[in-house]
Amino acid sequence: MTIVQQPRKLKDDAAFVRLKTAHHVHAITLHVNASRLNRPGSPVFDPWENIVPLLAMILLSLTFMFAANEIAGVALLILSVIAYLVIIRPWILQRVQNRTREVAMISLRNWTILWKTGAISFSLNHKNASCRSPSDDWQSFVTEHLAIETPDAALFKKTTHVEKDSASGTATQSIEF
């Protein structure tokens, strides 16, 4: 008996299709460490997104210093720093998260590059199981937890349990995936 293994590329493609399908039907949640990706060298880093708000705040403060007075300019600079930390920085990180989620699901190549950064992970929505990059093997995790039996089959096996409470006489239905 000869055992023929699929080439790694086909296994990766099949696992990525399963992962992408699970993400599309909200069976998994993709977690992104945006702080780790919001730096030069990251595939989703946008320098202008970081530079423009800071530059605008400094220029506005300097303009205020020269146009009004120095105290008003310094006060505006202090308020700008607070606004940056409380409003702008979280907004930038949210944009990086959204961009990462979009880019990761475009292709296996993008997914692999982002996985190697160690800034993404995913968890199953129906079980307490997760896979963290880059230490965990996402292909094995997907193959084990997101099995598809046939191309037309549902993503998960669905089992319905009906339990009847003898005291109250009510039936409770639960669905397991």
Image (spheres, rainbow, N blue to C red):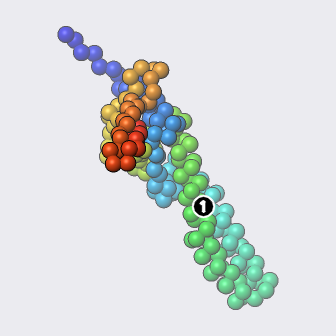
Task: Using the image as rendered, state which of residue 8 and residue 27 is in the foreground.
Answer: 27
Task: Using the image as rendered, state which of residue 50 and residue 166 is in the foreground.
Answer: 166
Q: Is residue 134 visible?
A: no
The structure residue drawn at horizontal position 67% and vertical position 84%, both measured from the top left corner, is 75
Task: Using the image as rendered, state which of residue 95 and residue 77 is in the foreground.
Answer: 95
Q: Few, some or many C-alpha atoms within 10 Å of disc 1 (few <14, some 14-19, many ≥20)?
A: few
Q: Position of residue 67 (x, y in %)?
A: 80, 83
Which quadrant holds the C terminus?
Answer: top left
Query: Would residue 85 appear left or right of 158 to someone viewing this image?
Result: right
The structure residue drawn at horizontal position 58% and vertical position 71%, both measured from the top left corner, is 86
* Amino acid type assigned to the residue bearing label 1 in the image: Trp
Q: Position of residue 149 (x, y in %)?
A: 38, 22
The structure residue drawn at horizontal position 53% and vertical position 52%, both measured from the top left corner, is 97
> Quadrant of the rendered structure where residue 89 is?
bottom right
Label 1 sits on residue: 91
Q: Image height check: is 15 above or below 60?
A: above
Q: Image height check: is 59 above or below 149?
A: below
The structure residue drawn at horizontal position 70% and vertical position 78%, both measured from the top left corner, is 61
**Residue situated furthest right in the rendering:** 67
> Quadrant of the rendered structure where residue 77 is?
bottom right
> Quadrant of the rendered structure where residue 145 is?
top left
Query: Would residue 176 appear left or right of 51 to someone viewing this image?
Result: left
Q: Position of residue 79 (x, y in %)?
A: 64, 79
Q: Position of residue 134 (x, y in %)?
A: 36, 46
Task: Using the image as rendered, state which of residue 36 and residue 97 is in the foreground.
Answer: 97
Question: What secondary structure is found at the residue carrying circle 1?
Answer: helix
Q: Is residue 42 visible?
A: yes
Which quadrant holds the N terminus?
Answer: top left
